[in-house]
Amino acid sequence: MKILKLLQLFKNLKPCAGYTTKKKYVETRIQNKLTNLQLIRLNN
């Protein structure tokens, strides 16, 4: 649920200085979280 809210927030943001970098950073973090979840599922 949190991930969806983050994505929604970023969709609503207007481009500004540092926007792309920040967006990329958040996307990477979300991707890492999803990867971690998948790894946890595989290990259990």
Image: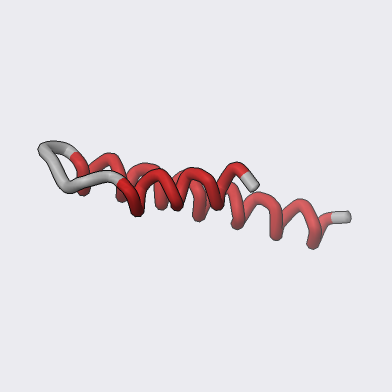
Outermost residue, front side: 12
The residue lying furthest to the right in this view is 44
Q: Is residue 16 left or right of residue 10?
A: left
Image point 40% across, 44% down: which residue? 9
Q: Is residue 19 above or below residue 7?
A: above
Quadrant location of the C terminus in the rendered image = bottom right
Q: How is the image coloured?
A: secondary structure
Question: What residue lies at 60% left-to-right and 56% top-to-bottom?
Answer: 35
Q: Hey, which quadrant is residue 22 in on the image? A: top left
User: Residue 5: horizontal and vertical position, in percent?
Assistant: 52, 45
Residue at 70% over, 59% down: 38
User: Considering depth in this image, is 1 or 28 the residue closer to the camera?
Assistant: 1
Measuring from the top left, give residue 39's x and y in whole percent. Answer: 71, 56
- Residue 4 is left or right of residue 43, and the answer is left
> Number of callouts in the render?
0
Residue displayed at 79% across by 62% down = 42
Relative to residue 44, is residue 26 depicted above or below?
Answer: above
Residue that lies at the very extreme toward the left in this rendered image: 17
Could you tell me residue 29's position as x and y percent? Answer: 47, 44
